[in-house]
Image (cartoon, grey):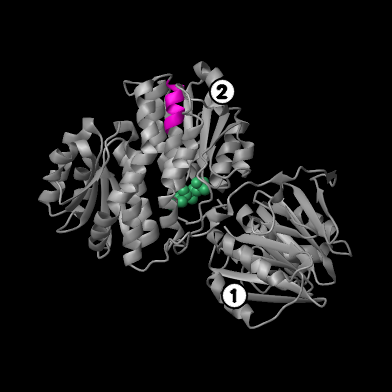
Amino acid sequence: MCGIVGYIGPKGAVPILLEGLKKLEYRGYDSAGIAVIEDKNLELRKAEGKLKVLDDKLSLEKFKGNIGLGHTRWATHGRPSDENAHPHQDCGGKLALVHNGIIENFQEIKRNLEKEGHTFSSETDTEVVVHLVEKFFSGNLSEAVQKATALLEGSYAIAVINQENPDQIVAYRQDSPLILGIGEGEYYLASDIPALLPYTRRVIILEDGEMVELNRENYRVIGPGGELLNKEIEEIDWDLEMAEKKGFPHYMLKEIHEQPDVMRQLLEKPLRGSEIELPEIDAILKSQEKIEKIFIVACGTAYHSGLIGKALLEKATGIPVEVDMASEFRYRSPLIGENSLVIVVSQSGETADTLAALRHARDKRAKTLGIVNVQGSTIAREADQLLLIEAGLEIAVASTKAYLNMLTAFNLLALKMGDGDIAGNENGELLHLLREIPAQVEKTLLRMEKPVRKAAEYIKNWDNAFFVGRGLDFSLALEGALKLKEISYIHAEAYAAGELKHGTLALIEEGIPVVALLTQESLLEKMISNIQEIRARGGYVFGITQDRFASRVAEEVDFLFKIPNTADIFAPLLGTVPLQLLSYFTADFRDCPIDQPRNLAKSVTVE
Ligand code: F6R
């Protein structure tokens, strides 16, 4: 939700800010803006629309200023427009401020500031912050920021510059990510690491309540009590190549194709011996007999991975597992206690609802485990135990490789906690099958492209589609439907196949596309009966099944996708591939902006 960048150093700031914003555009892309101090004058340029619009606008000007801020927006308060785009300014026009997050008490602050004579020119919550800084400014920007932020409620990372001091940026973090990049005689600020990678790998990740003051010669990190902090500089070892498209037309397709590799990477250490090695969860294993209940909490795609995680963990451990959408979790007063294990799942590690759920669980003294992709993210740092899913940088808004590795992580966890017995299989046999999965994902990718394109040609003309399955396949169907909705804008419903006849069957009409998952042997015949009910009413069924069931399924569907044979519990790891490609090609045929679907953002740091 919004990306912020900052630069102070010897170079021209504008190209650096724009480059950084490009890397952060996944966080929001409805408008963008920059502020740069040019000969002691603050120059602001903003533009509604994608970053390209701002970029084009700026290409006509030649700014030389070497200190500046940039912002790419995902609107929360006020529609996308030039006026609502950041940076925002104070009444005197001397300060410029960018913000990521939400100021919950902005209306009250705004009313008071208006009474004091401040005038506002946008509908945003952010604008109150720059006016508050103006109100408290009496020569020391850091002091003014400290006083202003003390009055704010909500989540915010902010950065501010003052045209009268072109040698300083002050930034503050509270519940929204902010990272300081340290270069040679220059400093950078960004909401996320990829924006810093072209310039430096040396970073300091700010914590809540911390402020950073960047001067030309040095920087100071100041703690919540005003104390000077000596924070460790971390070296980032990410591969910059991951942030490029590598010849693929979209990040989403590139990320789908990276799945075999990232999965191998995740499985490598845990599967190198005859038993699963997961030292990250040793503490959980030690207390396992005391765990009375497991909760899995997440949002969106990560939540869907949790539904599969529940089935696996219950089978493996015999401990009851509940799965919650993070936005619902703490409001239903879940019965968590010291003997609960709360697993939070998040690609970004910054999702506001998931983070709030984690904090709620910690308040209730539950044990917590984070299944997270982004190292150093807030959830990764705050969870008691951490299982990193190692999917690498995921840029497309629609999550693919992170989802697959979330599923893989749940499989590892279940196999480890199940102590060799899950779904009646011996661990040795399952480990062998799991080792084969990355190669099978590769094979599935190769197999699928042609048939999926054909299916997408059909689906692209419909306004509605259904995804059905039973057991693990139903959880996978939910993810398939979300992917299609999100990037192709086709309305898609996922149903437990046995539930259709209780109402939804009324929507089946001649030709409507229904994607049916049939990967689970024990449910195969039941699924076939449900498919017959759908086809009898005119539904056009695309089946997804394992090779070994193909001859049985082929005559029951209109179109068949075959995935390689595996144990049924691993089938979702392969079944997700045709679903991802189906949504991708359907969206591509419909000319949708695949990597940046409308109204969405990659990292949802507001509740
Ligand atoms: C859908 C998608 C979202 C995210 C959700 C949670 O493709 O990506 O539904 O899964 O916003 O995000 P994280 O995993 O970052 O907590």
For mark 2, what is the residue? 282
Q: Do the residues labelled 2 and 1 touch (CB within 8 Å)?
A: no
- In the displayed structure image, the side of residue 323 where residue 348 appears, left or right: right
Image disc number at residue 438: none
Magenta run includes residue 412:
yes
Residue 321 vertical placement versus 539 (above, below): above
Label 2, label 1: how far apart the Cα atoms are: 50 Å
Q: Is residue 145 visible?
A: yes
At a point 56% along the width and 63% down the height, the residue shown is 25
Q: Position of residue 506 (x, y in %)?
A: 18, 52
Which amino acid type is shown beneath numbered disc 1?
Leu
Q: Which of 493 and 131 is in front in this view?
A: 493
Quadrant in which residue 303 is drawn = top left
Please state the extent of the stretch shown in magenta in the rendering.
411-418
Name the one closer to the observer, 551 or 230: 551
Q: What residue type is labelled 2?
A: Asp
Secondary structure beneath dot 1 equals helix
**Residue sitting at 77 percent across and 52 percent down?**
211
> In the rendered view, does 401 fall on the left or right side of 94?
left
Graded by Cα atoms within 10 Å as few (under 14), some (14 to 19) or many (20 or more), the crowding at tag 1 reads some
**Residue placed furthest toward the right:** 139
- Within 10 Å of disc 2 (Cα), the crowding (few <14, some 14-19, many 20+) is some
Q: Which of 193 and 364 is in front in this view?
A: 193
Of the image marks 2 and 1, the number of the one nearer the N terminus: 1
Question: Helix, strand, or loop for circle 2?
Answer: helix
- Give yes or no for residue 398 being in the magenta stretch: no
Residue lying farthest to the bottom in this orientation = 60
From the image, tell me which residue sits under label 1.
54
